[in-house]
Image (tube, grey):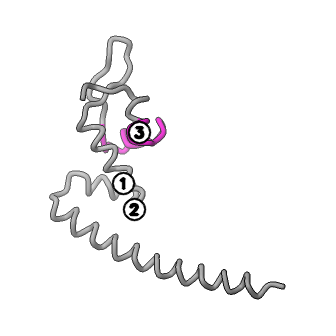
């Protein structure tokens, strides 16, 4: 893969330009280069990094937490993700219970 533009990076990662700018402002990633017109360019590692940042955000981590995780040893990342998985499983149980109660409530409305 050659270098990609900011627009292409956003398309590949499925995030907005603003998201990438936030990642950069938080110190999570930087453009790899600029072309002769001043457009920001990103390499394969930057694309992978942006995808990882997005994934961690989707699981509920804040950018400051991600900053501590993104370069952490794999063992730390694994342990942290196991903890997050436990939290998500508990939230899933809570939501399933809530959905059941809402359905019951709906059924009892005349």
Counting from the top left corner in percent of width and height, residue 17 is at 47, 35
- The residue indicated by pointer 2 is 59
Instruction: Tell me the residue at 28%/37% (across/down).
Output: 46
**Mark 2 or mark 3, which is nearer to you?**
2
Please check the rendered image and state whether residue 91 is part of the magenta-colored stretch, yes or no.
no
Please check the rendered image and state whether residue 24 is part of the magenta-colored stretch, yes or no.
yes
**The quadrant where residue 90 appears:** bottom left
**The quadrant where residue 102 appears:** bottom right
Q: Point out the residue furthest to the right here.
A: 110
Identify which residue, 59 or 66, lies in the foreground: 59
- Name the element at disc 1: helix
- Name the element at disc 3: helix
Q: How many residues crowd mark 2 within 10 Å: few (<14), some (14–19), many (20+)?
A: few
Q: Earlier in the sequence, mark 3 or mark 1?
A: 3
User: Label 2 to label 3, Cα distance in Å?
Assistant: 18 Å
For residue 40, the mark is none
Counting from the top left corner in percent of width and height, residue 77 is at 22, 62
**Mark 3 or mark 1, which is nearer to you?**
1
Which span of residues is magenta-colored?
A: 10-29
- The residue indicated by pointer 1 is 55
Q: Earlier in the sequence, mark 2 or mark 3?
A: 3
């Amino acid at each position: 893969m050659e270098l990609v533009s900011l627009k292409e990076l956003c398309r590949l990662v499925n995030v907005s330009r603003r998201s990438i700018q936030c990642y950069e402002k938080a110190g999570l990633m930087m453009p790899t280069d600029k072309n002769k017109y001043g457009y920001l360019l990103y390499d394969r590692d930057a694309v992978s990094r942006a995808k990882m940042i997005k994934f961690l955000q989707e699981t509920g981590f804040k950018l400051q937490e991600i900053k501590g995780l993104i370069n952490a040893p794999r063992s730390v990342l694994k342990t942290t993700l196991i903890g997050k998985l436990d939290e998500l499983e508990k939230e899933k149980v809570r939501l399933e219970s809530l959905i059941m109660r809402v359905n019951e409530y709906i059924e009892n409305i005349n």
